[in-house]
């Protein structure tokens, strides 16, 4: 039986983890490149498979085993929280059941839960609470809004699901501004996210219309030039990577050729 095919979520979480510890350790001043990082973790290894591991992690082509995650955490505190964050599992397995949504919400940090929960139960909250959550620009806030969006769908609260969807799409740039380790992986994360969220309208009494959102349009129209450039560069790099390009939505073939001329 072969290995399961990798998904956008597998790429996103591994790249996020890699970029988090890479950025942190390089900022300490002792490490400058992938080769230095390999020496730091493994010493001078003669095993080519070991030497190539971090090159695979860099592009999410392999998922680290538990002992490797623990090893990295011992040298870069907080890295395990990135790769083990519940959002990856939630997105991958699309947890839309009401009871499961509430269970997942209960595991989120207190600084998030205090806006929507009291004594383990969902309390009355309004859009201002959702706006406070979105203002954190974190993986926790993204996860919370995603879960509340689908909770709104399950309880037939169009207002809740639509408000969460709008706040999600409008907080994506903030996530990148505050978290450099998503500067590359967000391309996969945002594609997956926008496949699973939607605005809801009713046509007549009983015909719901789901409106999908395009984060690239928000990037083009609303993001700052600095963040827009970071994002488009990351996407361009993935478009020309032979093992990743199929996971990026197709575009005009002339643009693909332009990407190759500009960035290869």
Image (cartoon, rainbow, N blue to C red):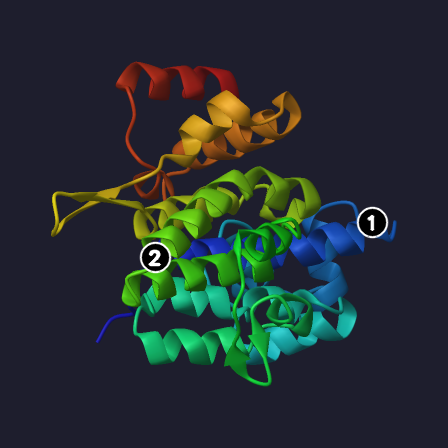
Farthest residue, direction bottom? 119
Q: Which residue is drawn at 66% across and 53% down?
A: 136
* Residue 45 in the image, given as x and y percentages of width and height: 66, 66
* Residue 2 in the image, given as x and y percentages of width and height: 24, 71
Q: Which mark is residue 7?
A: 2
User: Which of 7 and 89 lies nearest the eye of the viewer?
Assistant: 89
- Residue at disc 1, secondary structure: helix
Q: With 218 as the anchor, is 8 left or right in this view?
A: left
Query: How many badges with numbers are in the image?
Result: 2
Residue position for label 1: 27
The answer to which quarter of the image holds residue 24 is bottom right
**Cβ atoms under marks 2 and 1 closer than 8 Å:** no
Q: With 170 as the anchor, is 205 left or right in this view?
A: left
Q: In this view, does 263 lie above or below 119?
A: above
* Residue 257 in the image, given as x and y percentages of width and height: 35, 17
Q: Which mark is residue 72?
A: none
């Amino acid at each position: 039986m072969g290995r399961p095919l990798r998904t956008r979520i597998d790429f996103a979480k591994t790249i996020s983890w890699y970029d988090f510890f890479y950025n942190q350790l390089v900022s300490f001043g002792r490490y400058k490149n992938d080769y230095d990082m390999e020496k730091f973790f493994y010493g001078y290894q003669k095993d080519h498979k070991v030497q190539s591991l971090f090159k695979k992690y860099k592009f999410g082509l392999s998922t680290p085993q538990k002992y490797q995650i623990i090893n990295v955490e011992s040298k870069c505190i907080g890295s395990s929280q990135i790769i083990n964050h519940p959002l990856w599992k939630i997105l991958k397995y699309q947890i839309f059941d009401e009871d499961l949504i509430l269970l997942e919400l209960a595991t989120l940090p207190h600084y998030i839960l205090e806006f929507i929960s009291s004594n383990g139960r969902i309390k009355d909250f309004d859009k201002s609470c959702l706006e406070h959550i979105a203002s954190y620009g974190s993986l926790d806030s993204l996860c919370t809004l995603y879960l509340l969006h689908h909770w709104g769908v399950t309880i037939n609260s169009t207002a809740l699901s639509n408000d969460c969807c709008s706040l999600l799409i409008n907080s994506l740039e903030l996530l990148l501004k505050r978290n450099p380790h998503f500067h590359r992986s967000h391309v996969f994360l945002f594609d997956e996210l926008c496949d699973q969220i939607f605005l809801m309208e009713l046509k007549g009494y009983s015909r719901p219309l789901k409106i999908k959102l395009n984060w690239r349009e928000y990037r083009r129209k609303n993001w700052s030039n600095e963040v827009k450039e970071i994002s488009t560069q990351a996407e361009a790099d993935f478009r020309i990577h032979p093992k990743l390009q199929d996971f990026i939505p197709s575009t005009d073939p002339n643009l693909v050729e332009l990407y190759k001329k500009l960035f290869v």
